[in-house]
Image (tube, rainbow, N blue to C red):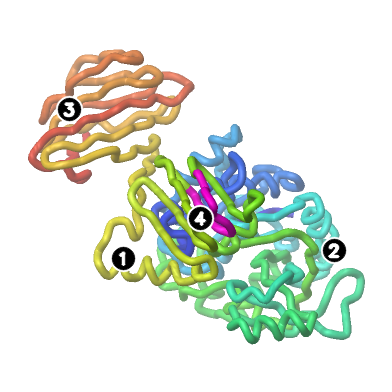
């Protein structure tokens, strides 16, 4: 069996924690691992790392590789980059093409497809169900996984199965249904043969290629091209999910029910359900002091948050934005993002932390003629040799060792040491050690935009 991890989504329902430049799958919601890292660990229970393909957008390449490196895993070569976001159907088609052409995966190989932003517990029970379902995929069936609903959830899609029951642990699928209103969701729950759509699938390579060519020929015809040709024409693919493209159209599909705790963490209400609560029903993360408050979720970042006498609210604080809402209204957060984009607010899509191939930087403060950043350079990484036309820079090492190139000389700086980089001087910053380098950068000048870079 091989695995495809879909890691290109950029959802808006967990703003301001999740944004376009740092989407949900990279959030560390419970514990020290992000949802993406949890997904990889889950797959590594039954797959080798070299049998996993991660498909993501170019904007998230550095995040994906950084997360893999953070897990102590050797960087997998199987990170497939979508030239542009086009939905899960084109992403899966591209991944299959990569597997066949670059990894020599046979046409009868079974593939497991999973999103990278789901929470699953217990994982042992999930793996058991997945391994037992493999026989149906090997026989040429597409297998999807349904979650037994515990409430009339309006944030999930649903799968309807044959009400007469299943055999040998699988059910015949009768239909897929998009996110319902509350009345319809209650009806689904009452009927008992409706399951939440987990978005996870199991199939043979040749079966899915045939289904794509049959139901979405504009995708299928690209599968006859070489991988490089497919990538060059990727933008012409339809923006469509695998559910719309294949699952809702095929008759060759079965469902395996999963009796587990599952969430796509698609809203703050579902996040509240996942987190541990205190005696008053408060879910708390960060430096938070709830006084006479109950049934609330309060997530802090860098500030002390005191909640006094509140009931049933959400408070989400980041270093540049605060969201306050009633619990139960969190599905409307995407509307907040829409309004912010109409106002051309940077906060709609960008965090103050920006990821680069060499590491990341966070803007700590900026004003007229100055900007202060915390810059972290990954082990053995380096910035390009460059100079700035409008600004000078001052670097102070706070952790690790820096190798600095100024024109034709090299300087090594240790913790507490600093150096001044004049305007128009070619320079390079490198981390010569196997541990991260952290510096504080103070820029001064008439223009401080990131595009003031002349690279060699």
What percent of the width, then of the height, locates residue 314? Answer: 49, 59
What's the CA distance linking mark 1 and mark 3?
A: 38 Å
- Residue 12 position within the rendered picture, expressed as x and y whole percent measured from the top left: 44, 63
Residue underneath mark 2:
135
Front residue (pair 79, 195): 195
What residue range appears in magenta? 289-299
Q: Residue 290 magenta-drawn?
A: yes
Query: How far, Cα to Cα, is label 2 from label 4?
Result: 33 Å
Q: Look at the image and tell me in which quarter the C terminus lies.
A: top left
Instruction: Residue 337: tell me if it is visible.
Output: yes
Residue 229 visible in the snapshot: no
Q: Residue 74 at x, y = what percent?
A: 58, 34
Image quadrant assignment for residue 198: bottom right
Q: How far separated are the C-alphas under marks 1 and 4?
A: 18 Å
Residue labelled with disc 3: 426
**Disc 1: which residue:** 340
Q: Earlier in the sequence, mark 1 or mark 3?
A: 1
Q: In terms of secondary structure, where does tag 2 sit?
A: helix
Q: Earlier in the sequence, mark 4 or mark 3?
A: 4
Q: Earlier in the sequence, mark 2 or mark 4?
A: 4
Q: Where is mark 4, residue-wise?
A: 24
């Amino acid at each position: 069996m091989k695995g495809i991890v879909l890691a290109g989504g950029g959802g808006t329902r967990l703003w301001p924690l999740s944004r376009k430049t740092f989407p949900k799958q990279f959030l560390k919601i419970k514990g020290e691992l992000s949802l993406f890292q949890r997904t990889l660990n889950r797959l590594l229970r039954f797959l080798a790392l070299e049998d996993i393909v991660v498909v993501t957008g170019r904007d998230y390449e550095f995040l994906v590789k950084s997360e893999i490196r953070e897990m102590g895993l050797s960087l997998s070569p199987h990170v497939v980059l979508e030239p542009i976001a086009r939905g899960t159907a084109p992403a899966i088609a591209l991944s299959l093409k990569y597997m066949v052409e670059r990894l020599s995966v046979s046409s009868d190989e079974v593939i497991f497809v999973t999103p990278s932003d789901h929470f699953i517990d217990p994982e042992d029970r999930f793996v058991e169900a997945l391994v037992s379902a493999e026989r149906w995929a090997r026989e040429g069936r597409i297998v999807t996984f349904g979650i037994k609903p515990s409430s009339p959830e309006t944030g999930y899609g649903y799968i309807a199965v044959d009400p007469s029951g299943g055999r040998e642990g699988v059910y015949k699928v009768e239909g897929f249904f998009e996110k319902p209103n509350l009345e319809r969701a209650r009806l689904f729950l009452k009927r008992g043969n409706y399951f939440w759509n987990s978005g996870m699938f199991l199939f043979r390579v040749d079966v899915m290629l045939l289904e794509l060519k049959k139901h979405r020929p504009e995708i299928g015809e690209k599968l006859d091209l070489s991988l490089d040709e497919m990538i060059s024409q990727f933008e012409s693919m339809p923006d469509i999910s695998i559910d719309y493209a294949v699952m809702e159209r095929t008759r060759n599909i079965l469902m395996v029910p999963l009796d587990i705790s599952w969430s796509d963490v698609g809203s703050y209400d579902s996040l509240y359900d996942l987190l541990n609560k205190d005696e008053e029903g408060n879910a708390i993360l960060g430096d938070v002091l709830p006084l006479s408050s109950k049934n609330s979720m309060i997530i802090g970042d860098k500030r002390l948050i005191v909640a006094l006498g509140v009931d049933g609210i959400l408070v989400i604080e980041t270093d540049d934005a605060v969201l306050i809402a009633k619990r139960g209204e969190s599905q409307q957060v995407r509307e907040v993002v829409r309004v912010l984009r109409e106002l051309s607010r940077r906060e709609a899509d960008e965090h103050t932390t920006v990821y680069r191939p060499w590491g990341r930087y966070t803007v700590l403060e900026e004003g007229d003629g100055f900007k202060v950043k915390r810059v972290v350079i990954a082990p053995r990484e380096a910035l390009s040799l460059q100079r700035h036309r409008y600004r000078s820079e001052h670097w102070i090492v706070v952790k690790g060792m820096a190798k600095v190139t100024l024109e034709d000389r090299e300087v090594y700086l240790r913790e507490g040491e600093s150096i001044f980089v004049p305007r128009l001087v070619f320079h390079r910053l490198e981390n010569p050690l196997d541990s991260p380098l952290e510096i504080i950068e103070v820029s001064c000048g008439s223009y401080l935009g990131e595009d003031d870079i002349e690279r060699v």
